[in-house]
Amino acid sequence: MSETEQQQEWTPIHGEPYRSVPYRPARMPEAESLAHAAELRERMRERRTVRQFAPDPVPAQVVRDAIACAATAPSGAHQQPWTFVLVQDPEVRRRIREAAEHEERVSYDGRLGEEWLAALRPLGTDEVKPHLTDAPALIVVFQQRYWLGEDGTKHKHYYVDESVGIAVGMLLSALHLSGLAALIHTPSPMRFLSQVLGRPENEKAFAVIPVGYPAPDCQVPDLVRKSLDQVLVEV
Ligand SMILES: Cc1cc2nc3c(=O)[nH]c(=O)nc-3n(C[C@H](O)[C@H](O)[C@H](O)COP(=O)(O)O)c2cc1C
């Protein structure tokens, strides 16, 4: 792909077929493929959700590159229904923390219901969310429920939850493989994020992702993941 093509501005295509272009990536030799897969499996096994961050700054370009990786995710009808807001401003992070803790207080005080609270109890999380101000960067992910045509017509997006979920999975993987720690935080409800960040009406907050380095005394729950046998069915 030429430089010019890479820099082309994306505009929605509606009701028109794409022109097709050759796709002939070099085939990876099997031994190399096996080695990559085994290494990646091990690297990904080491990923953990971090809730205690060091205040040290992170290279913003690493975060931008991880967001660029996430933005290569497949999406329903290639509608790319996502916006990533990178927040480093301490005052904006403080406002997000204040609003999130307000919502979380109501949630932990009973709004979540006993079953949900029981599911969270093993993790020991509560309404206090220091990671929102300790982590040097927050990525707030929004899903675009629809797009607005130039004439103001609303066009529905398809498979928005699935598409944004895949993009966030790729984002978390890219951050981890680039040496940064992250947490996917989903305060409920999340409307305050649109207000604090001034996002348009077609966008709905999906998650807040604090990004940084683990604090020197960071602890994580001693979780056991399902084994491959428990999650894989081969037919
Ligand atoms: C969709 C989603 C929402 C989550 N929301 C929260 C959250 O609001 N607060 C939190 O502390 N962790 C949250 N988590 C993190 C999970 O608790 C964590 O991924 C899980 O305990 C497994 O731990 P691990 O990521 O270290 O493997 C969320 C994870 C996912 C996938």
Image (cartoon, rainbow, N blue to C red):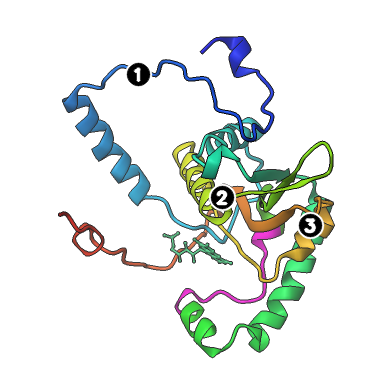
Q: Label 1: state its secondary structure.
A: loop
Classify residue 61 by image quadrant. top right
Whether label 3 lies within 8 Å of ligand 1 gets the answer no
Magenta residues, as a range?
Answer: 122-132
Q: Which of the two discs, 1 and 3, labels the residue nearer the N terminus?
A: 1
- The mark lying in front, picked from 1 and 3, is 1
User: Which residue bears the numbered disc 3?
Assistant: 194
Find the distance from the CA under tag 1 to the CA under tag 2: 26 Å
**In front of the other: 163 or 59:** 163
Q: Amino acid at mark 2?
A: Val
- In the rendered view, would you say 59 is above or below 197? above
Where does label 2 land, which residue?
A: 164
Whether residue 173 sits left or right of residue 53 in the image: it is left
Front position in the image: 93 or 73: 73
Q: Which mark is in front, 3 or 2?
A: 2
Find out whether residue 81 is within the magenta segment. Answer: no
Q: Position of residue 112 (x, y in %)?
A: 61, 83
Picture coordinates of residue 64, whole percent (x, y): 63, 34
Q: Nearer the viewer, residue 197 or 138?
A: 197
| Mark sitting earlier along the chain (1/2) | 1
